[in-house]
Amino acid sequence: MKQIYKVTYPTGKIYIGKDSIGSCRYFGSPNMDIVNADFASLPEATQKDYTVRKQILWESASCSEAELSAKEVELIREHRSNDPAVGYNRWPALPC
């Protein structure tokens, strides 16, 4: 099952990604340097006890890889996860 998912970090920021096989263990590949820098600003108690949430936003058993990629971009834009104040996606770039 192909899926588009949203990961919410304890920083409150999100990451939207795609998964071509529907693995429950896959949480995407945001830039971990950016995630870690934000994480370091959290209270120490939060750094020691936190939850990362993964939500399936959309799935299909029959879509093509091109359709999956297009849906990912659509949902990144819809959720504004490519806005550094909102999320960890850095593509597609925000308009100037």
Image (cartoon, rainbow, N blue to C red):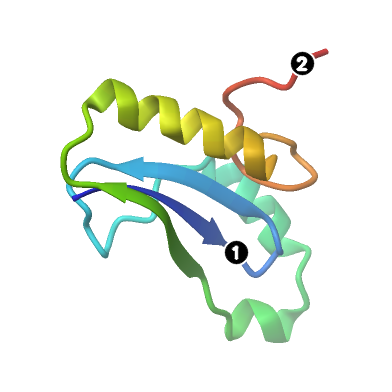
Q: Is residue 70 left or right of residue 80?
A: left
Q: Work out whether residue 81 can be spotted.
A: no
Mark in the foreground, 2 or 1: 2
Find residue 28 and name its label: none
Question: Is residue 56 visible in the rendered structure shown here?
Answer: yes
Percent coordinates x, y for residue 32 in the rendering: 53, 46
Which residue reaches farthest top? 96
From the image, tell me which residue sits under label 1.
9
| Residue bearing the label numbered 2 | 95
Three-letter amino acid code at disc 1?
A: Tyr
Q: Position of residue 44 (x, y in %)?
A: 73, 80
Viewer-side residue, 57 vs 17: 57
Q: Where is the C terminus found, in terms of image quarters?
A: top right
On the image, the x and y values in percent for residue 6 come to: 50, 55
Three-letter amino acid code of the residue under disc 2: Pro
Callout 2 secondary element: loop
